[in-house]
Amino acid sequence: MNLNYIHRIREESPTIVKRTFLNHAARGPLHGKTAEAIQHYTKCWGEFDFEESNQKKKDSRVQFSKLINASEEEILFTPDVTAGSRLAANLINYEKDSNIVCFWNDYVAQVYQALFLKKTKGIEYRPVPDRKNKVLPEEFAQKVDSNTKLVLLSHVQWLSGFKADVKEIAKIAHENDALIVVDSIQSSGAMVNDVKNWDIDFLTCGTAKWLLGPNQAGWFYMKKKLIKEFDPPFASYQGVEFGNYDEPYWNVNDMVYMEGIFKYMNVNPSDFLYAVASGGMGIILEFGIKNVQKRILQLTDYLINELQQLGGFEFVTPLEREYRSGVVNVRVPKNIEIAKKLKEDNIIVSSRYGGLRISPHFYNNEEDIDKLITGLKKHLE
Ligand SMILES: Cc1ncc(COP(=O)(O)O)c(C=O)c1O
């Protein structure tokens, strides 16, 4: 593990040198490389050199494909997680007795796709229950059947940090001829993602958390063999072949979709935001996602152990290591008040679900955790 690199990242990052930042499940902090990318964009714009900034945008797509073990042609620009879930949910032809399956307390970017289709098309929604905050394949197996068209799931749950067995749940979906869309925003950049090994159909993500990027620079993955299967569900000139610079520019009598995944593009993706996102993803790729995951789990082991030493806390997060991620949620009395008090001490965590949601990245260290524990002791007295 490259400790010099960790040291440099800390030193270069204005948000974390001033405070103890343990809140990546909410929003990633500003890092030196990201700040550099912003400055670089300003320079490009000042010189009207958009070729260079567009190149950064293209590079960011390759970076994300590497992080999830996809190929570049399987990655589409989408603003946020919701846009990706919505796209997946609207590709499918539903029949009268179709159903959609989703973990009941998943993030609403996913849950609302199921509720919207129920409301507008009368599609049955089957919420999957948890077992003490565990989101388990056997519970999905109880809900998925031959009428299931789509399964929606987060790899890592936003409240509990529970890490699901995506491969097993995808297998259940496919055995029933259903498709699966995975939300990876609480996981990409923190945990190893492998769309090929998971054998999933779609993945939707944003860069503003563990990928250390800006808001509204998101990603959608679609398995290569599915790209030809569907028609774009929404009209947009972004997904249509450009004619030429002689009028009429675009064909105004017919829409000729682009080849490949770009036919699904329905926004004009910002070269600025993706150039900035490439700074954040560069940090993760340079340290290596396996090293990132290993270090995060070491830190959360340490955190859990320290909290257990302090005693008497109930964990929202299931503690078995196979289910763990970068998110640890522990119930404390008056959690909202305590999170505010910690903030006054410059220790940044979130209050969620009756607990404190603590989410360190690889460049946090044991000293950061010690500061949190000291702060907690002080405010719980
Ligand atoms: C699991 C999960 N999905 C999605 C989002 C954000 O969704 P969107 O990018 O559509 O705003 C969050 C944000 O907290 C999240 O935790």
Image (tube, rainbow, N blue to C red):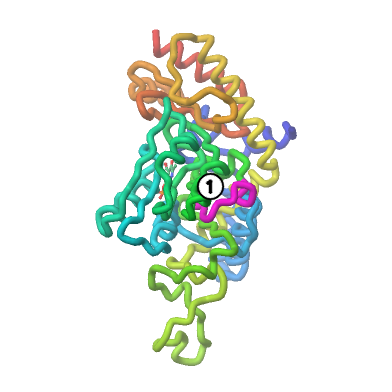
Quadrant (top left/top right/bottom left/bottom right) for the C terminus: top left
Q: Foreground residue, 374 or 284?
A: 284
Report the residue at 60% width, 70% height from top: 51
Secondary structure under tag 1 reads helix
Which residues, given as a range, are shown in magenta? Answer: 194-206
State which image quarter holds ligand 1. top left
The picture places residue 158, in percent across and down from the top left corner, at: 44, 36
Q: Which residue lies furthest to the front in this view?
A: 146
Q: Foreground residue, 302 or 320?
A: 320
Quadrant (top left/top right/bottom left/bottom right) for the N terminus: top right
The picture places residue 315, in percent across and down from the top left corner, at: 45, 20
User: Left of 95 or right of it: where is 360?
Assistant: right
Report the residue at 58% width, 39% height from top: 190
Q: How crowded is mark 1: few (under 14 residues within 10 Å), some or many (20 or more)?
A: many
Amino acid type, callout 1: Ala
Report the residue at 47% width, 73% height from top: 239
> Would you say residue 200 sits in the magenta stretch?
yes
The picture places residue 264, in percent across and down from the top left corner, at: 47, 68
The picture places residue 66, in percent across and down from the top left corner, at: 66, 52
Q: Is residue 210 visible?
A: no
The residue tagged 1 is 170
Report the residue at 55% width, 51% height from top: 200
User: Left of 379 or right of it: where is 43?
Assistant: right
> Would you say residue 201 sits in the magenta stretch?
yes
Q: How many marks?
A: 1
Q: Can residue 295 be seen in this view?
A: yes
User: Left of 114 or right of it: where is 267?
Assistant: right
Looking at the image, is 140 positioned above or below residue 130?
A: below
Looking at the image, is 296 positioned above or below residue 330?
A: below
Q: Foreground residue, 71 or 11?
A: 71
Ligand 1 within 8 Å of the CB at mark 1: no
Q: Foreground residue, 108 or 9?
A: 108
